[in-house]
Image: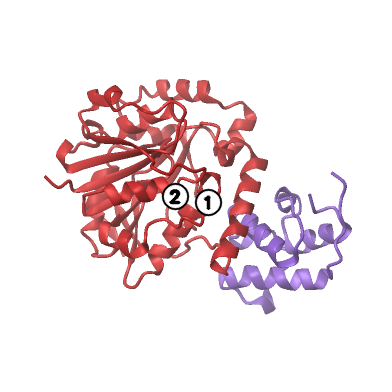
Amino acid sequence: MQPIKYDIDPQVLRTWMVNYVCALLGLDAATFSTADRFDVYGFDSVEVVIMAGVMEEEFQVLIDPSQFFEAPSVDRFVAMFASGASVG
Amino acid sequence: MTPRVSLVVISYEMKRELPRTLLSLSPRYQNCRADDCEIIVVDNNSREKPDAAAFAGLNANLQILACSKPSPSPVGAINEGIARARAPLIGVWIDGARMASPGLTNACIAASKLHDRAVIATLNYQLGPNVQRISCEQGYDQAAEDALLASIAWPQDGYRLFEISTAEMKGGPGGAMLESNALFLPGSLWGELGGYDPRFAEPGGSAANPDALVRALGLPGTQLVRILGEGTFHQVHGGVSTSSQVGAGNALKEASRTYLRLRGKPLVPVRHKGWTFDSRTGEVGR
């Protein structure tokens, strides 16, 4: 499938993801490490896919959930998304 | 005579799987009296309807009903089953392809005595060497599953199902729980809840099952009780969320979107441990 590049500010997406994960897990966004893999802080694959659905609703984009497993951290996902490679 | 527990089991195109499920819920397997447990199968418009006569040998208090308004979602069938249930405790099997371990019914009855407003969650397992969305991509199929069940001489010792299955919850029995596929509530609580939400109209029910758990735990004064040492075990039957990783991912993602639109908040797995009831020891963890 041809990658699609959405016009979303990577920083907006990063902030949204950090806030989402921190709210869910009760973590402090100020000290949250965006480089860590999702599973390091107990965010499992089911929750990652649920986040993909919420993200689609929030940003009106299409996301292939499997890309979260290829880019399993906030930093890596944002980078992939910004490049246009993270969408299905 | 009023049964002690009603089991509502939804069936759709489960000619292979339903007989094992019902055997696993039968009085002999569950070590209870037939009068104690009524089983209500609601068939959601299978091409070949299950026939109660075929299960006469189980000596179970069994009714097989045809859903009056069948739809792609099992929600209507579930609510019809709950409405027919007579026992003070009602367990719902949204997926009739799930076999039970031998002490599940008695464990849930015992757990229901721990709290007037107990929300009793049994834990989900899937037959096979991995969760089926992965194992099916590696060759696991119904024939492999039949061989696996034969390898433990099922149903001789139903607890051996644990040896040939994979837990759905990666975090262990106390970990984050998206849903329970045999969810037990007092009948009065099902009434307060209004059953399952029919707005989850998609095939398979979308997020209806997680939603029922979340809403039940949101009712005032309810207490989560997780059952340890028992479980339900999914037989592979071509369902979209267990046949491939892509299918499972997309189904869950769509369920997440549907839930957000209906509830105005993200679907969140249950993270608090609640109480536990260990059926093997009778120990209660609070």
Chain drawn red in the picture:
B
Of callouts 1 and 2, which one flags the residue occurring earlier in the amino acid sequence? 2
Q: CA distance from mark 1 to mark 2?
A: 7 Å
Labelled disc at residue B61: none
Mark 2 neighbour density, 10 Å: few (under 14) some (14–19) many (20 or more): many
Query: Which amino acid lies under the numbered mark 2 shown in the image of this protein?
Result: Val
Which residue is denoted by mark 1 in the rendering? B201
Q: Secondary structure at mark 1?
A: loop
Left or right of residue B269: residue B184: left
Dot 2: element: helix
Q: Pinpoint residue B132: horizontal percent, then vertical percent.
A: 55, 36
Residue situated in front as seen by the camera: B248 or B271: B248
Amino acid type at image mark 1? Ala
Q: Residue at horizontal 57%, vertical 42%? A: B241
Q: Nearer the viewer, residue B224 or B243?
A: B243
Pointer 1 and pointer 2 on the same chain: yes
Q: Can residue A47 be seen by looking at this rendering?
A: no
The picture places residue B146, in percent across and down from the top left corner, at: 46, 22
Q: Which mark is residue B75?
A: 2
Which chain is assigned purple?
A
Instruction: Residue at 45%, 58% (x, y): give it.
Output: B197
Q: Is residue B265 above or below residue B33?
A: below
User: Residue shown at 60%/60% (left/top)?
Assistant: A43
Which of the two residues, B193 or A66, is positioned nearer the viewer here? Answer: B193
